[in-house]
Amino acid sequence: MTELITPTASETVLEVRGLTKRFGMLRAVDDVSFAVPRGSITGFIGPNGAGKTTTMRICATLELPDGGDAFVDGRSVLEDPRRVRDRVGFMPDRFEPYANLDVMQFLDFFARANGLRGRERLRTVCAVADFCGLDHFKDRPATGLSKGMGQRLHLAKTLLHQPSLLILDEPAAGLDPRARIEFRALIRELAAEGAAILISSHILAELSETCTGVVVIEQGRIVLGGTLKDIAAGVRERQDILLRVLGDLDAAHRYLLTQPLVHEPQIVENRLEFTFSGDDEAAADLLARLVGGGHRVVEFVARGVNLEEIFMHATRGRLQ
């Protein structure tokens, strides 16, 4: 799949600067600014009507802003939209394949539309079909696919012109659990190959397992943004830790009661749970003391803040 991503020198692929978009009296997007680095997966979350899709469409050159600009690999969506389209793969939330085309014909049509010719076109169509797991569905009518396979075809179409930026609007909506897991694996692989990915979804638990960063928007304004690690530090001062030991669970519980920075240790079924107010180095020291004290630790896991907590912390449920 390496050949499907076109590398450039800049580490920031998408830079959004002060975007504003009005619909009548409604300011749907209000001075929005953020950046998406190369090789990252940035979750774009917010309530319905917050301005996510409008912002994404502006970045994909499908809407014109009333103010501000967005840059993809340094190219302005206002001043150089053609060059931007060469670098952006936009996957809207609805996929409506053309009738009377099978999977490969559908991909070939869009490869031609993107200017691919001859052997390059055939190689690219086969490469994206293989990457998206469509090999066994090449002769299947594009309109006869399941929801999950239809989303794979939708993604394959989006990859044909080797975009450096993928903008995915609700790509996992309606997928069954297996299809969501497989689609998530595709997204991770694309990021590992160097693509910058901006993805919106209301399935926050899904995004928590995929994203490296997040941008939260409400009423058209950015209310929070950054890496998950940095945001988690601001949302929760303490981290939850799960501890499982072999042997005397009560003895481990008594030991935790004597330790600094450990709060409210409790025995829950066959493990211990507690909150910890120290940093990673202090947590490592605690683990070393537990092992040194003869407690046979088989699991010591810090549970990070998930996107649902971040969303509830950052938003107030305001609609426009």
Image (spheres, rainbow, N blue to C red):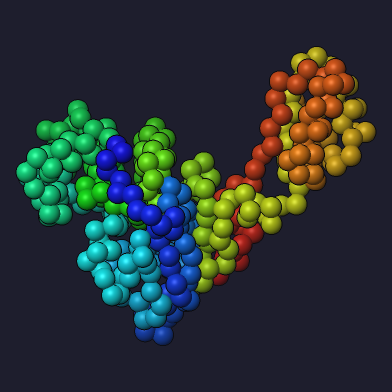
60 versus 244 height, above or below: below
* Residue 123 seen by the camera: yes
100 versus 63 height, above or below: above
Farthest residue toward the right?
A: 258
Instruction: Give percent across and percent down for residue 170.
Output: 38, 52
* Residue 199 seen by the camera: no
Q: Quadrant of residue 58?
A: bottom left
Q: Nearer the viewer, residue 140 or 134?
A: 134
Q: Nearer the viewer, residue 60 or 281?
A: 281
Instruction: Give percent across and percent down for residue 199.
Output: 41, 53
Instruction: Give percent across and percent down for residue 38.
Output: 42, 51
At x 31%, y 70%, the residue is 77
At x 15%, y 54%, the residue is 114
Instruction: Give percent across and percent down for residue 174.
Output: 36, 45
273 versus 319 height, above or below: above
At x 53%, y 45%, the residue is 208
Farthest residue toward the front?
A: 9
